[in-house]
Structures are given as C-alpha cells and as structure tokens.
Amino acid sequence: ASPGGMASAQTPLGTFLIARTGTASVSVLTAVCTHEGCTVTGSSMSAFVCACHGSAFSTSGWVVMGPANRPLQQFNAQLTDGVVTFTA
C-alpha cells in the first residue's frame, strides 16, 4: 500500500492494525480496543475505529476520540521490500 494506507492482519497471535506512515515506514498496533476489549476492525480518515463504541485511534495508537482513554499497544515494525515484519 502507498503511504496513508491502512489494513488489518490476522496472525496466529491475534489481529493487528497496520498503517503505512511513510514511503519506508509502517506502524503496527494491537487491534484490541482499550475501552472494552472489542476488536478494532474499521478505519476512517487516517484513524482506526472501534465499531463497538466508536473509539478512534491515530496510526500511532493514540486516542483521537473516546470513550477509550488509553492508546493501543504499538509494536516495533519494519518495512523491507514491501514486507512488514514486527515483534509482538
């Protein structure tokens, strides 16, 4: 995806949110909402949105709209030759 692209990925460890933040950078976040533990599945205008209660999070995990009051957990990630790797 080009910078600004957002997606979710299912792994054996759970669901993660991925945002392409630059030409050579990505952000990887847990998809577990800090409000009540729902899975964040949507995105809107460069924010990840939880369908359960409407909390929105920036691509770096910070809360941009409540009711959540804690950021999503962010993981160290790399983008190399179009492949995202991260440590959870």
Image (cartoon, rainbow, N blue to C red):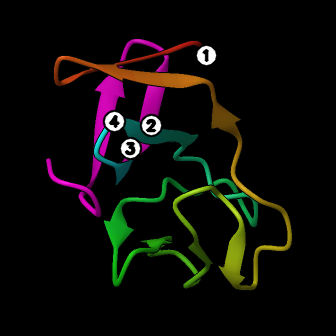
For label 4, the residue is 24
Q: Determine whether label 3 and label 2 are within 8 Å by CB.
A: yes
Residue at the image position 52 percent from the left and 60 percent from the top: 59
Quadrant of the rendered image containing residue 18: top left
Front-lying residue, 50 or 19? 19
Amino acid type of disc 4?
Answer: Ala
Q: Which residue occupies 61% across, 24% down? A: 76
Which numbered disc covers residue 32?
none
At mark 3, the secondary structure is strand
Which stretch did the figure color magenta?
1-20
**Magenta segment includes 4:** yes
Amino acid tagged 1: Ala
Q: Write the residue at 17% across / 24% down.
A: 82
Circle 3 is placed at which residue position?
18
Q: Is residue 63 above or below residue 67?
A: above
Residue 20 in sight from this viewpoint: no
**Disc 2 to disc 1: CB gap under 8 Å:** yes
Does the image show residue 23?
yes
Q: Is residue 40 left or right of residue 8?
A: right
Tell me the distance, in whole angstroms, between the alpha carbons under discs 4 and 3: 13 Å
Q: Amino acid at mark 3?
A: Ile
Q: Nearer the viewer, residue 88 or 23?
A: 23
Q: Position of residue 24 (x, y in %)?
A: 33, 36
Disc 2 packing (10 Å; few <14; some 14–19; many ≥20): many
Q: Is residue 22 left or right of residue 81?
A: right
The residue under the point 31% across, 29% down is: 10
Measured as percent of width and height from the top left, residue 77 is found at 51, 24
